[in-house]
Amino acid sequence: MNTLSINAERLLGRLRELGQIGRDSDDRLVRLAGSDADKAGRDTFVAWVRAAGLEVAVDRIGNIFGIWRHADNADEAPVLLGSHIDTVINAGIFDGCYGALSGLEVIETLKAAGYVPARPIAVAAFTNEEGVRYAPDMMGSLVYAGGLSVKEALATVGTDDTILGEELERIGYAGSEEPGFLKPHAYVELHIEQGPVLERKGVPIGAVENLQGISWQRVTIDGDANHAGTTPMSMRRDAGHAAARVVTFLRDRARNANTPTVATVGCMGFEPNAINVIPSRATFTVDLRDPDEQRLQAEEAALAAYLKELAAAEEVTISVERLARFEPVTFDRRIVELVEDAVRERGLTAKRMTSGAGHDAQMIARIAPAAMIFVPSIGGISHNPREHTPEADLIAGANILLDVVIRLAAE
């Protein structure tokens, strides 16, 4: 059994400190990518990385790396740890930050113990994982893995009409390294579950073996605006009603399926958006997720077929725009087993899991063996200030990460 453990006080203190950076006038935590608050969070993270004696590197998309290597292992591919430190609007303090800070903590613990790894160990804080200000989400790791060009990513226009590349320049994080300059031997990401399973099962650690595929689409339905009082129901081309039918179709189909498919309509807007006018246009998003690629394709096809039928039935025009599409990811079996081994050696229990949320690990898995470690989220709450994980679970997860890194870095 490994007796080495992370410095819990240091890790928890940094989580609390980072969690205070980016508070707005209503005390909401908001660190959107490329913002002044993001700069403040990045500056703090980089200061901790430098204080740990690590080499700091920033690539052109703004991904930050803290690298620990020495003369004898400098040419070896590193074990890469990390996550992100940008947040959603009105966020909790653990999502992403826990993985990035735990990666740094693991390296500091090993350095303090006099450990000499056979290969470098690095920690990453990837840019714009949340995708709130700039789409798509997981952008920094997607660019790093070669799934999106640097030029295209830097030209992305945000919800506030800013340009990502210009904002990274402004806050001082338009780095010089080419994304992908550091190809990992393996990648491990520690994260809060963001769901209720581990807490409900009473299991402290999730060994994440796969991650759901994600399909994002924007649907636009065009009908006719007309007077709400004088137009008979039978003579309406009501875009709002047609949109409502899509919402119920998706919910009913997902609930009645004997599969883990989930479907969400998260954004919707009507035009002209007046109480006494029949909507002439409805625009909304559809988020489909499933861990099986064939099932995900089947759900996309079912939606497309329904929209075609709906257009005819409601006498409306429907168009669809693809916003993002990521195939399901199967993580490296050997690393998943290393997680389970470490859990047993610590006298804990683990559950193999599917991640319902997207993570940087799914992008890095394109270029290196990868896996994730989950710890419980109380009530399954995340992207919310009530996001919480007990300290004992945070410490346990970081120690499992430590043990897995020792094994990987010895290879």
Image: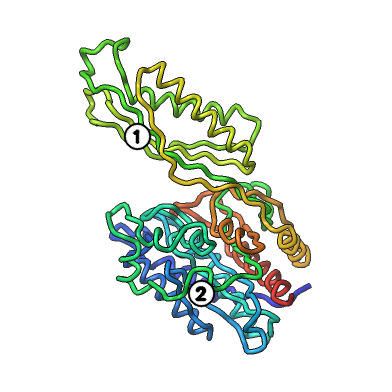
Residue type, numbered disc 2: Phe
- Nearer to us in this view, 52 or 388: 52
Quarter of the image for residue 37 reads: bottom left
x, y percent for residue 270: 29, 32
State the mark number for residue 194.
none
Gap in angstroms between the C-alphas marked 1 and 2: 39 Å
- The quarter in which the C terminus is drawn is bottom right
> Local crowd at mark 2 within 10 Å, few (<14), some, or many (≥20)?
many
> In the structure shown, which secondary structural element does the residue marked by tag 1 occupy?
strand
Q: Count numbered badges in the picture.
A: 2
Q: Residue at the spot x=69%, y=75% of the render?
A: 409
State the mark number for residue 65.
2
Mark 1 or mark 2, earlier in chain: 2
x, y percent for residue 216: 47, 42
In the figure, 297 relative to 347: above or below? above
Q: Residue at the spot x=28%, y=54% of the render?
A: 160
Quarter of the image for residue 19 reads: bottom left
Residue type, numbered disc 1: Thr
Q: Residue at the spot x=45%, y=37% of the render?
A: 286
State the mark number for residue 283.
1
